Amino acid sequence: MDTVTIQLEEIMLQPASAITAGAVVLAVITIAFGGTFVLRVVTGKQKANALQKGFFRAGHAHAGVLVILGLVVLLLLDSSGVTGWMHLGADGVLVSAILIPAGFFLSVLGRDPQKPSGVIALVWTGFGLLTVSLLVAGIALIVAGAAAL
């Protein structure tokens, strides 16, 4: 059986990326607080209709997943030496981690909404930004890898 050895080089974050990552890590506290809100909703301690319950769950889940994805993309771009405008791919993913959950939460505020308000446009704006950002980041990583061959 062959043994594969992987040598990991030291990963250094660019200073701006370190600041961004630090701010995002601190912002995860708000996601944790949001989790306690969602828990109150699903246990009936906070009144909410079925639409609100579904949207609150979706908002919370998207926030957590997109923050993790944004931090991973940030690390990948920095470790690959990507700089310049293509590095904005990571920032776009992190901004979408704000827009999408905000759209889910804010579009169903009120006592008993029967449908989401126009604020739901934040969800679609966030998904558009997420798509473009991942496209940019993916291409940047491929270009960086090809250049390093």
Image: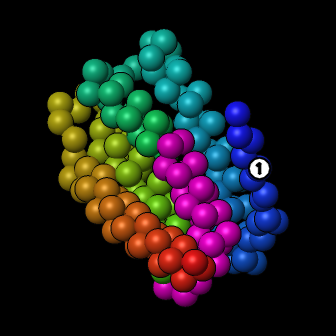
- Up the image or down, 145 lies above or below 83; here it is above
Q: Is residue 141 magenta?
A: no
Quadrant of the snapshot with the N terminus: top right
Q: Which residue range is magenta in the image?
A: 64-85
Residue at horizontal 74%, vertical 71%? 13
| Frontmost residue, 141 versus 49 | 141
Q: What residue type is labelled 1?
A: Thr
Q: In this view, does 56 lie above or below 49?
A: below
The kind of secondary structure element at disc 1 is: loop
Q: Quadrant of the C terminus?
A: bottom right
Vertical relation: 65 (above or below) 17: above
Q: Name the residue under label 1.
A: 5
User: 10 Å neighbourhood of mark 1: few (<14), some, or many (≥20)?
Assistant: few
Q: In this view, does 64 lie to the left or right of 105?
A: right
Q: Which residue lies furthest to the right in this view?
A: 10
Residue that appears at 48% across and 12% down:
43
- Can the viewer see residue 85? yes
Is 131 displayed left or right of 9 in the figure?
left
Where is residue 111 drawn, in percent x and y?
31, 30
Q: Which quadrant of the figure has residue 110?
A: top left
Principal secondary structure, stretch drawn in magenta: helix
**Residue 46 percent location from the top left of the image:** 46, 20
